[in-house]
Amino acid sequence: MTTSRASDQTTASLLCEFLRLFYDKGWVAGTGGGICGALADGTMLMAPTGVHKERVTVDDLFRVDRQAAVVSPPKNPGLRLTECSTIFCAIAERRKAGSVMHSHALTAVLAADVARGGDRIIIRDLEMLKGIRGCTNADHHAVPVVDNTAREPELVAGIRRALDAPEFQHTACVLVRHHGAYIWGEDLWEAKRHAEVYHFLFEAVVGRARPA
C-alpha cells in the first residue's frame, strides 16, 4: 500500500486536530494519551506529556529521532516529552508505522479485561473488521494484551514481544491491561481510521461479554 507523506506543517496541524477529536471522544481525557506522526526526513513529531491534549498546539510538539532522542524541543518552554516516546518509536520500527496514537479509553481497558489474564482477545463476526487494513469480516482477529507497568518506558519489551509474535502480525493495536491501547497506521489518516474502528470493536467485544 502506497501512502502519500503530508508536509511537516500539515502533519503538525493534523496531530493537534486529531488530539482534539480524540479528547471529544473521551480517549485522551485528563491529560492522558498521546499521538505521534512521522515527518518527511524520518523524524517524528510527538505531543508532550502532562498537558491537556485538547489544548496542544503546533508550538508544543517535540521533534524526535527514531531512538526517541529530542532533535528539536517545542517553542513553548517547560514541556516534557511524552513517556510514550520509546513505545511510539518501537512500533514505528517494527511495523513501519507513520503514526501511533495512545488511548486511555475506558472501552480499551474493559476490552483487555475480556482476555481474563490471557495474552490476547479475539475479535470476530463484525463487519467493522473491514476497517483494519488487510482484514475481512470473516477474520478471527487477534489483538495482543500485555501487562501494565509502573512507567510507560517499561512497557517497551512486552510490546516488542507482541509485535514480533507471528500470531499478531495482522494487528494494528496492542492493548495494555488496566491502562489503554496503542493503535497505529501507515500514516496519520490510517491511524485515525484504525483508532475509530478499534474503539468500535472494543465496545462490541465488551458488550458481547456482558451476561445476558
Image: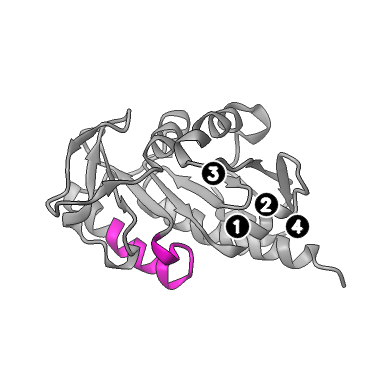
**Residue at the spot x=31%, y=60% of the render?**
51
Q: Name the N-terminal-most of marks 3 and 4.
A: 4
Residue 22 on the magenta segment: yes
Q: Nearer the viewer, mark 4 or mark 2?
A: 2
**Foreground pick, 14 / 182:** 182
The Cα atoms of the two marked residues, 3 and 1, are separated by 14 Å
**Foreground pick, 146 / 186:** 146
**Looking at the image, do the residues carrying marks 1 and 4 touch, with CB atoms under 8 Å apart?**
no
Give the residue type at disc 3.
Ala
| Vertical arrangement, residue 41 with respect to residue 191, above or below | above
**Looking at the image, do the residues carrying marks 1 and 2 touch, with CB atoms under 8 Å apart?**
yes
Give the residue type at disc 4.
Asp
Left or right: 202 as drawn, with respect to 211: left
Residue under pointer 3 = 172
Q: Which residues are magenta?
A: 15-31
The image quadrant of residue 21 is bottom left
Q: Name the N-terminal-most of marks 3 and 1.
A: 1
Residue under pointer 4 = 125
**Looking at the image, do the residues carrying marks 3 and 2 touch, with CB atoms under 8 Å apart?**
no
Residue under pointer 2 = 112
Q: Position of residue 91 (x, y in %)?
A: 45, 35
Q: Which type of secondary structure does the marked residue at label 1 adopt?
A: helix
The Cα atoms of the two marked residues, 3 and 2, are separated by 15 Å
Hey, which residue is sitting farthest left in the picture? Answer: 75
**Foreground pick, 15 / 5:** 15
